[in-house]
Image (spheres, rainbow, N blue to C red):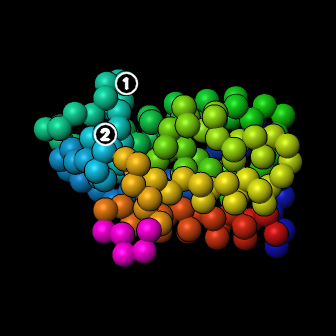
Amino acid sequence: MKNIRILVAGLSLSAAGLVAIVNDESYTDKAVIPTKGDVPTVGFGSTFHEDGRRVKMGDTTTPPRALVKALAHISKEEAIFRASLDGASLSQAEFDIYMDWVYQYGTGAWVKSSMRRQILAGNYPAACDALLAYKFSASYDCSAPGNRVCAGVWTRQLKRHAQCMGAVQ
């Protein structure tokens, strides 16, 4: 079945997209620094509390509160993401993949990204390929063979890239 593109303004993260995010992020009841050089996260990778405060080491949560934090974070980021793609179209699968990326890297990185530029230009396969440029954590190349510092960062990008290419075919 071909993925149908619709205006981004009419899309929102699907339930499957939310499940993918919380599954990839895993759950922690106490704030952790997920990779060297990263900021503290709690719950399902949330870097912010529902009220906008940054997560700090020592913060704790419960699974229900963690989901509320994730949804608050996603809602804020989703509005910025949609506005950054005014007039552009994506399929639901593409939207979910890029929102997963935005949840990890933030809308500040998104608005400057080559993925966004390629989508606005209608170059969907090139936008997928641009996902692979995000392979660094704290200046470390996470795609380096034998990497034990941030291998998950690269694995997640490869997964997103494969899903994205499947969605644009």
Q: Is residue 147 magenta?
A: yes
From this view, report whether residue 163 is shown above or below residue 55: below
Q: Identify residue type, mark 2.
A: Val
Foreground: 169 or 117?
Answer: 117
The answer to whether residue 135 is visible is yes
Asked whether, in this view, residue 141 is left or right of residue 17, the answer is left
Residue plotted at (81% across, 40% down) = 120
Q: Is residue 11 magenta?
A: no
Foreground: 142 or 64?
Answer: 142
The answer to whether residue 6 is visible is no
Asked whether, in this view, residue 47 is left or right of residue 155, the answer is left
From this view, report whether residue 24 is shown above or below residue 134: below
> Residue 58 appears in which quarter of the rendering?
top left
Residue plotted at (54% across, 31% down) = 108
Secondary element under disc 1, as helix, strand or loop, is loop
Q: Name the residue under label 1.
A: 52
Q: Name the spot of residue 6 as percent of width and height, x first.
A: 83, 47
Q: Name the residue under label 2.
A: 39
From the viewer's perspective, is the residue at label 2 or at label 1 nearer?
2
| Marks 2/1: CA–CA distance | 15 Å
Neighbour class for label 1 at 10 Å: few (<14), some, many (≥20)?
A: few
Q: Name the spot of residue 138 as percent of width and height, x first.
A: 37, 47
Q: Identify residue type, mark 1.
A: Gly
From this view, report whether residue 149 is shown above or below residue 77: below
Specify the segment rendered in magenta.
Answer: 144-148
Residue plotted at (31% across, 40% down) = 39
* Dot 2 or dot 1, earlier in sequence: 2
Q: Name the spot of residue 126 as percent of width and height, x first.
A: 77, 56
